[in-house]
Image: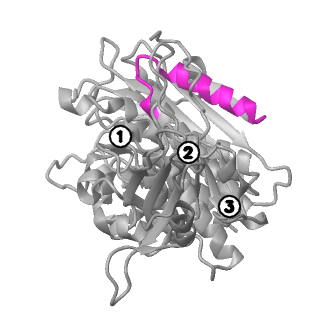
Amino acid sequence: MARTGTRSTIGRTPPELWPSGGTLVSTDLLDDGSVDAIAVPLVPAVEGEHGAQPGEGAADVSALYGIDLAEIADRVGLTGASGESYVLQLPRAVGSAVQLPWQALPPRVVLLGLGARSAADLRHAGAALARASRGLGRVLTTAGVQGSQSASQAAQAARAFAEGYLLAAYRPPTSATGPAPAPSAELVLLGRDGTRVTAALDAARTAAAATWLVRDLTTTPSSTKTPAWLADQAKRLAARRGLETQVLTPRELSAQGFGGILAVGAGSASTPRLVVVRYTPTNASGRHVVLVGKGITFDTGGISIKPRESMVTMKTDMAGAAVALATVLAAADSGLAHAVTAVLPLAENHFGASSYRPGDVLRVYGGTTVEVANTDAEGRLVLADALAWADATLEPDVLVDVATLTGAAAVGLGKQRGALFGTDDALVAALERAGEAVGEPLWRLPLVEDYADAVRSDVADLRHVPADAGLGAGAITAALFLREFVGSRRWAHLDIAGPARATSDRHEITEGATGFGARLLLQYLADLR
């Protein structure tokens, strides 16, 4: 693949969603041959009952097909737990003399567990259906519908189920000469209609598309994904939406004093960039939220070189920049009331004759000097430049950075939660709520003041890695270093080193780049008053 090539698959859109107020019995879709499968919801047994119990529409399907679906669920050991699925492949008759009850009906029935029908359960169920229906054309389901639901509850259930479906439908893009990934089916959600449900499905598709974009960009190999290439992608995607874009090249970075970005990128033949994408709503009466995303397109560790095993995933070290970019684009797509600016410091941390060294003293944007202790802690240096510049020039009401920053955060919190730091309790609480709502949870860690001296230096204003290797608290000291560059802004730092990558599929999470962070930031923006 050419180093400067563009993959047309970047910015793909998820499968279509179709709300319908019909029931399984009355819908005309069953008769036109366009439906490949019907997904029937199952729920866990209540006290005193045994096995999975049929959900909404299951009785209708049993009657249509002349099959006892509850007996089949019991026979294959389904419990109705969220994420369970079983595909019943129905045979076709041989010869015109034999007529089967399902002769004119879709040839597959998917038995789908919904669990307790919480938002997380419905996302898991949607994800299970996406995997069970991969390669099909269209699927019908009443999953998540309950007769007692209010319009608001129906909309929330539809969004959760649809998001799970769309997120799990993702497949990594391939090169122009490679095989196309098998698509997931279009999804028709029966029993759901009305303005609220339609809006909820639109929101689900926008959020899923943002996550798809993060995954696409993060998955792109570094042989293609240079800082210049990523800057071009940002410009192209922003131009589609009429957004303003600014790109600073090495000449401008040098003239304006971006010493951190320039030092980190000095060892690479692929020169660094700083990209700014601005969304300003027509009626700009809301807040101005600035998102800064770490964009290391590949990380060798520099002179403090990583072991080979640790380098394997380092094409994903720009996930924070992808999250910030996808969020500002989705904010524009959604017409959010708040102005959003994404700031993307992009560099490749390589090593060579011009690499920066441990012991060097850098001058970052604004004049702060920083002693370098470890060239493999490059992310906080590019973020320092970008945060200081955002504070000085953009006048943000809220400043949030997102980065695959420290292994310490992944060790402490594992692969399913991001680490959250902040200077404003209300901002931190709002981000926590947003994360829980969309299934991208955060866990707040403290900015321990007793550790602040660890980022002080005898030869510069700051030292970006503590001198005491036995201090520990690597995620905390990194956050304390970043805090020095945000002024008095309301600031939060998301360390997503753990959940940005996954080693296997799990519910709505896909193996490889997960896209963690885009949906929670969109939810935060939607909730912001």
In the picture of the structure, the residue carrying the numbered disc 1 is 460
Q: Nearer the viewer, mark 3 or mark 1?
A: 3
Q: Quadrant of the rendered structure where residue 71 is?
A: bottom left
Residue at 51% across, 15% down: 176
- Relative to 116, say whether 227 is above or below: above
In the picture of the structure, the residue carrying the numbered disc 2 is 36
- Residue at far left of view: 470
Q: Quadrant of the rendered structure where residue 283 is?
A: bottom right
Residue 391 is situated, as x and y percent measured from the top left of the image, at 60, 48
For disc 2, the neighbor class at 10 Å (few under 14, some 14 to 19, many from 20) is: many
Mark 1 vs 2, N-terminal side: 2
Mark 3 vs 1, N-terminal side: 3
Residue 515 is situated, as x and y percent measured from the top left of the image, at 47, 45
Q: Nearer the viewer, mark 3 or mark 2?
A: 2
In the picture of the structure, the residue carrying the numbered disc 3 is 200
Residue at 64% across, 26% down: 247
- Relative to 481, say whether 348 is above or below: above
Secondary structure under the numbered disc 1 in the rendered image:
loop
- Relative to 472, say whether 308 is above or below: above
**The magenta segment:** 218-243
